[in-house]
Image (cartoon, rainbow, N blue to C red):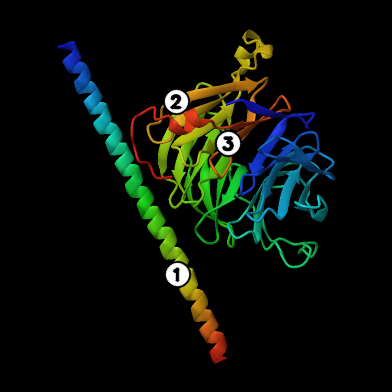
Amino acid sequence: MRPILLQGHERALTQIKFNKEGDLLFSCSKDHVINAWFSHNGERLGTYDGHSGAIWTLDVDSQSRFLVSGSADNTLRLWSVQSGKCLYEWEFPTAVKCVAFNETDDQVVCITEQRMGYQGAVRVFNINRDGDGTAQATEPAHMFNPIGSKATVCAFSYVQNRIVTGHMSGKVAIFDYKTGEEVDNNERAHGDEVTDLQMAPDRTYFITSSKDKAARLHQTKDLKVLKTYTTETPLNSAAIAFGKPYILLGGGQEAMKVTTTSLRQGKFETRFWHKIFEDEVGRVKGHFGPVNTIAVSPTGTCYASGGEDGFVRVHHFDQTYFKAKPYGEWEILD
Amino acid sequence: EDAAEETNISAELIAHRKRLVDEWNTWRALCEEEISDRKKGKKAERRGEEAKEEIE
């Protein structure tokens, strides 16, 4: 499984996402740039220039037509994937920490940071897909301020009018975005900040990673915890593999251990866990700093990791990965 | 005796894994059903709306 190294960022990666077909990979970084790459060979397709601050988050729609990004420059931007042009820009009082499209590509949810006297906010924008995409409404269709611990990550549920959120305190919650009401929560989903939230393809379950060193699989409907993957390092990202029953986890190492590990060794690993049996099955080394973000191609043929070291590594799975059955013959539904 | 115990343990482990896999697959099948019911429901809703519009 020889990785393809994507070199085009000068600072830490914050989020990476594959498009639906898995042929394109999008990456954003603290260096103010968004890149698009061909996943099969690592060639750069283009860049999306315009943000004037660290870019914390991005998402691409299922048609690979629109890209949204959120930045420390307090803007949410809509881009044309093909032309690289910025189609629309929304401005807020604080940084945008998380963005995500809904299943039908006509809504975007975003979280803005709680800072300088401003409350953290969740906004849902309707995306007008007619014409060239430049005719967007300035005002959000829905907006609310979650009370209590601030939200760090979010995604649309498969249930209408619902979003799920992960919070600073470790809480995971369901909100009705029309009323702003917290419909359900699991205060003790994690013991520390929730750092990533990724939905399964049909959105009936999702995975969260946390600084508390664990990742958890939750049922979207009622936030019941289905599985727990406990590691010995704070986690920054968790992804669900497709076609194989694996979970991919990435993170850093404890601050106290930093001085005892040689940075030159590229020791920062992506860990593979068995989704059902909750056991670690393998590790892939490579990054020279903590792994900040992991994405699995919807085709199930490759995955990518983005590091604090400024590199993106794309790994195409080889035959041994597809043939491997570390726990014997089990038919496991995705 | 040790060997016998080992096979016992692994048989137990396999039974445990089988239970986990069965539990997971049963739940996934239920989810799939729920999703397809929802989609059918939405379609029916849309058909209902279209019919209403025609009446108007």
**Residue pushed farthest bottom?**
B55
Asked which quadrant contains residue A66, the reply is: bottom right
Q: What amino acid type is highlighted by mark number 2?
A: Glu
| Circle number at residue A280 | 2
Q: Position of residue A49 (x, y in %)?
A: 84, 44
Front residue of A62/A54: it is: A62
Q: Is residue A252 left or right of residue A35?
A: left
Q: Are marks 3 and 2 on the same chain?
A: yes
Q: Would you name the residue on which mark 1 appears?
A: B41
Q: Give the spatial CA distance, label 1 vs label 3.
A: 35 Å
Q: Which label sits in the foreground, 3 or 2?
A: 3
Q: What amino acid type is highlighted by mark number 3?
A: Cys
Q: Position of residue A327 (x, y in %)?
A: 35, 29
Callout 3: chain: A
Q: Position of residue B10 (x, y in %)?
A: 25, 23
Q: Residue at x 36, y 54 (%)?
A: B30
Callout 1: chain: B
